[in-house]
Image: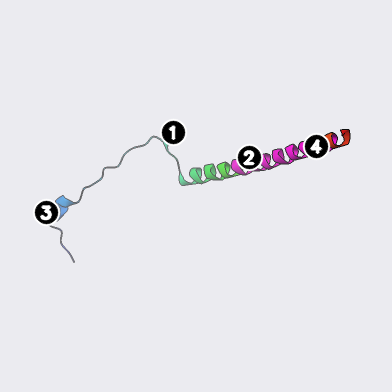
Amino acid sequence: MKYVTNSEHALKKLLKPVFISKAYRKTILENERLKKLEAKRLLKLDEKKKESCLIIAKIIQKESQRLINIF
């Protein structure tokens, strides 16, 4: 068994607990839920971006075909 002397105890800094009201607390589960929601939002945003690119490509292709048919 190891005994702690006063000089060794003085070197360790004791931290005091800090009270956080329930309204401001975030739990681990809440953080995970928020991360999942953010991942879903980014996935939807990426899908919309791809759809927009496809729509623009179709419009450009139609316009180029129309211009070719005119000449």
Q: Could you say which disc has been placed on residue 23 in the image?
A: 1
Q: Quadrant of the N terminus?
A: bottom left
Q: Could you say which disc has been placed on residue 7 in the image?
A: 3
Question: Percent x, y for residue 7?
Answer: 11, 54
* Side of 32 relative to 64 (left or right): left
Which residue is labeled 4 in the image? 64
Question: Percent x, y for residue 60?
Answer: 76, 37
Assess disc 1: are there few (<14), some (14-19) or many (≥20) residues with their C-alpha within 10 Å of its C-alpha: few
Magenta-drawn segment = 41-66
**Which element carries disc 1, helix, strand or loop?**
helix
In this rendering, the label closer to the viewer, 4 or 1: 4
Q: Nearer the viewer, residue 61 or 52?
A: 61
* Side of 37 relative to 58 (left or right): left
Q: CA distance from mark 4 to mark 1?
A: 59 Å
Q: CA distance from mark 2 to mark 1?
A: 31 Å
Q: CA distance from mark 4 to mark 3?
A: 84 Å
Question: Percent x, y for residue 48?
Answer: 67, 39
**Which element carries disc 3, helix, strand or loop?**
helix
Say whether disc 2 or disc 3 marks the residue closer to the N-terminus. Answer: 3
Amino acid type of the residue tagged 4 in the rendering: Ser
Q: CA distance from mark 4 to mark 2?
A: 29 Å
Q: Nearer the viewer, residue 51 or 10?
A: 51
Task: State the residue at coordinates (62%, 44%).
Answer: 43
